[in-house]
Amino acid sequence: MQEEFENKRTKEKNPLLRKVPHTIIVTLVFFVIIPAIGVGFWYGYQSIERISRNINNMESRFNSKVEIVENKVNRTETSLQQLLEEKFSDFQVKFSDVSDKVTDLEKLSEIDEELLKKYSRTYFLNENYVPSDLLEIPDRYKYYEDKTHKFHSRVWPFLQEMLEAAKDAGIELYVFSAYRSFGEQSVLRGRYNIIYGEEEANQFSAYQGYSEHQLGTTVDLITTGIDGTLDDFENTEAYKWLTNNAYKYGFVLSYPEGNEYFEYEPWHWRFVGIKLAKYLEATNKNFYDLSQRKIDEYRIHFFEDQ
């Protein structure tokens, strides 16, 4: 206790001793602590700067990677879209082809395959064959109004249009003969056999089952001024008009000069469809010159009006 008191008194007597702690503290503050804090702040700031730069660099690289990925995704999406469009387009084409084929098959199923067969000693129509729908030809188109002439109902508009077109051109054309059943052809052929003999009848008349008339799409046409017979028909203006215009309405001359089946019959015209008739006209061919396979290609167009 005494020693502590003595020390206190010594300090009070010596002012330097009282000031030394303050000087040291100030010195330490200005020359040690403050610089140390400054250095600490500077290093801290530098660290923050480095961290910030690193973060910015990382963010830039990340954004760059994201952009690359997005570009790849966009290209992939575009490629997939193009692929899908191509596949869909291919599918549409294939579906359209299938649909067209189905439609064609439906159309073909509605068209009697017999209508374009090559008869006249080639194909045979049995005794039960009758066209699906026959109508009575109006009297004003018949040469003998008291006779009954029937014709295929779906082909009649083509024949009527041709007869009207001839009339507009100053040509008188009338139906002399149209649909004949198996039985009617049999009776007619028997009559010809008796009158002309079988060998000669073979030159101008088909046996039953081989006649185009049984199809209901064939007519014998006549004009005025030849005494009601067909013998001189080839020398008439009506025949000339038919040779130049009948194909436009789907009709062709079945037995032209030099054919292998029957004698030349300028009055005998068969409907084969406008498309096939125009093809025959353009190629200068006869219906019976074509193979049945080639003819069958036109069956789907049989009732088309152009």
Image (tube, rainbow, N blue to C red):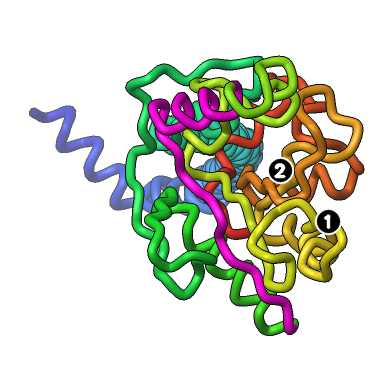
Is 228 rendered above or below residue 218?
below
* Residue situated in front as seen by the camera: 246 or 187: 187
Q: What residue is shown at x 72% (from left), y 77% (from top)?
A: 171
On whether residue 158 falls in the magenta region, the answer is no
Residue furthest front in the image: 195
Label 1 SS: helix
Residue furthest left in the image: 1
Report which residue position mark 1 lands on.
234
Q: What residue is shown at x 68% (from left), y 84% (from top)?
A: 168
On whether residue 177 falls in the magenta region, the answer is yes
> Which numbered mark, 2 or 1, is in the foreground of this view?
1
Earlier sequence position, callout 2 versus callout 1 = 1
Q: What residue is shown at x 76% (from left), y 28% (from top)?
A: 262
Q: What residue is shown at x 68% (from left), y 26% (from top)?
A: 196
Q: Which residues are magenta?
A: 170-193
On the rendered structure, is 18 left or right of 220? left
* Residue situated in front as seen by the camera: 226 or 85: 226
Report which residue position mark 2 lands on.
276
Q: Residue 58, which numbered label? A: none
Graded by Cα atoms within 10 Å as few (under 14), some (14 to 19) or many (20 or more), the crowding at tag 2 reads many
Q: What is the total number of numbered labels drawn onto the structure image?
A: 2
Dividing the image into 4 quarters, which one contains the C terminus? bottom right
Instruction: Give the x, y percent position of residue 2.
Output: 11, 30
Is 33 rendered above or below residue 166?
above
Graded by Cα atoms within 10 Å as few (under 14), some (14 to 19) or many (20 or more), the crowding at tag 1 reads some
* Amino acid type, mark 2: Leu
